[in-house]
Amino acid sequence: MKLTVETLVHAPIARVWSAYTTPADITKWNFAIDTWHCPRATVDLREGGAFSSRMEAKDGSFGFDFAGTYTKIVRHELIEYSFGDRSGAVEFLESANGVTVRSTFDAETEHSIEQQRDGWQTILNNFKKYVEATA
């Protein structure tokens, strides 16, 4: 099952793209709740390139790496990737009002659909807040 979350970011496409693909920016927004953080991220932004984001509780009690491989890159428009046996895509849709960032991904079976959608949407909301504050 594919899930989709999206947000409208009021910033230029160049800033939105950069914040989504630059490790120093990713560490500022890539977490779902305030008691977690993203202490490190790596990006090799090319087809076949790898990415990884470390997500962990600030108290160190739990953490995991979200990692995968880029399968298609269209600058300022699309990022497709695989992670494990799942895949995802991020679309960047520019309009007069800003950039709609739409993330579609394969659901997993460990967490409910609602938990997955809410978690990914919260991360995307953090992204919007971060970009708009730094644009």
Image: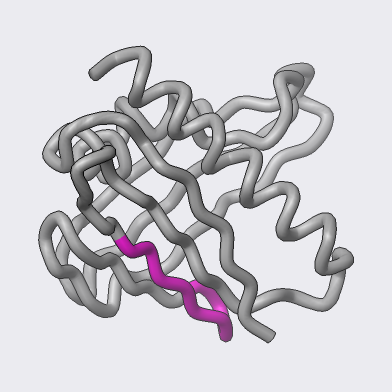
The image quadrant of residue 4 is: bottom right
- State the image coordinates of residue 33 (x, y, percent, origin top left): 73, 29
Q: Which residues are magenta?
A: 83-91
Position of residue 6 relative to residue 72, above or below, is above
Q: In the image, what residue occupies the spot 42% across and 22% down? A: 130
Q: In the image, what residue occupies the spot 44% across and 32% down? A: 128
- Split into 4 quadrants, where in the image is the N terminus? bottom right
Q: Is residue 69 magenta?
A: no
Q: Is residue 14 left or right of residue 52?
A: left
- State the image coordinates of residue 89 (x, y, percent, origin top left): 40, 71
Position of residue 85 relative to residue 135, above or below, is below
- The colour style of the image is one colour
The image quadrant of residue 133 is: top left
Q: Is residue 90 magenta?
A: yes
The front one of 58 and 9 is 9
Q: In the image, what residue occupies the spot 44% across and 77% down? A: 82
Position of residue 78 relative to residue 71, above or below, is above
Decide whether the magenta segment is chiefly helix, strand or loop: strand
- State the image coordinates of residue 36 (x, y, percent, origin top left): 70, 26
Q: Is residue 135 left or right of residue 124?
A: left
Q: In the image, what residue occupies the spot 34% across and 25% down? A: 131
